[in-house]
Image (cartoon, rainbow, N blue to C red):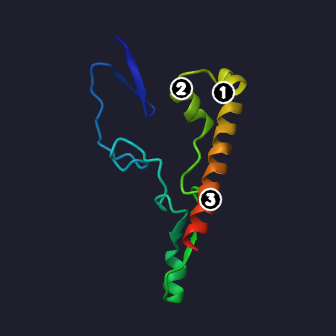
Amino acid sequence: MKAWRVRDTWLPQEQDREQIRVICKPCGGKGAIKNECRCRGRGEVLDKEKTDLQGVPVYSQCKRCAGRGYPRLKEAEIYAALGIPKSTWSRTYKLFFDRLVEHCHMEESSAERSLCKVTH
């Protein structure tokens, strides 16, 4: 007969463990974690402490995305989603991905400059 150890005591395998339902802290029981910030893409969040002190809304830079409006994906998440090993990611795809992100930032700033010219 097999046995397992539970908190410094040995229980035979036939005995059932007590099952406790616990809500996951990161997702709050929803089953998925969102990749969005509190800023919802704006890059700024309402600073509640400073707002309460001054009496007027005070906005500060979002700490999660550093004001970009979206959080950067971690390398581990990227190569896991692609289903490739870390070594293949770093040798083959990382440089391409970084340059693609850099190009997107340049195009975004170009579009923002064009919008400012039109609106101002």
Residue 1's x, y, as percent? Answer: 34, 10
Q: Mark 3: few, some, or many residues within 10 Å (few <14, many ≥20)?
A: few
Q: Amino acid at mark 3?
A: Ala
Q: Residue at 59% of width from left, 56% of height from top?
A: 111
Whether pointer 2 and pointer 3 mark residues with C-beta atoms closer than 8 Å, the reply is: no
Observer-nearest of 113 and 99 = 113
Assign a secondary structure to mark 3. loop
Residue 104's x, y, as percent? Answer: 62, 45
Observer-nearest of 75 and 4 = 75
Whether pointer 1 and pointer 2 mark residues with C-beta atoms closer than 8 Å, the reply is: yes
Q: Which residue is mark 1?
A: 93
Q: Amino acid at mark 1?
A: Tyr
> Mark 1 and mark 3: span between their CA atoms?
25 Å
Q: Residue at 54% of width from left, 79% of height from top?
A: 58
Q: Mark 1: few, some, or many residues within 10 Å (few <14, many ≥20)?
A: some
Q: Where 36 falls versus 6 (above or below)?
A: below
Residue 56 is labelled as none
Find residue 18 and report its image quarter. top left
Q: Which residue is mark 3?
A: 66
Dot 1 or dot 2, earlier in sequence:
2
Dot 1 or dot 3, earlier in sequence:
3
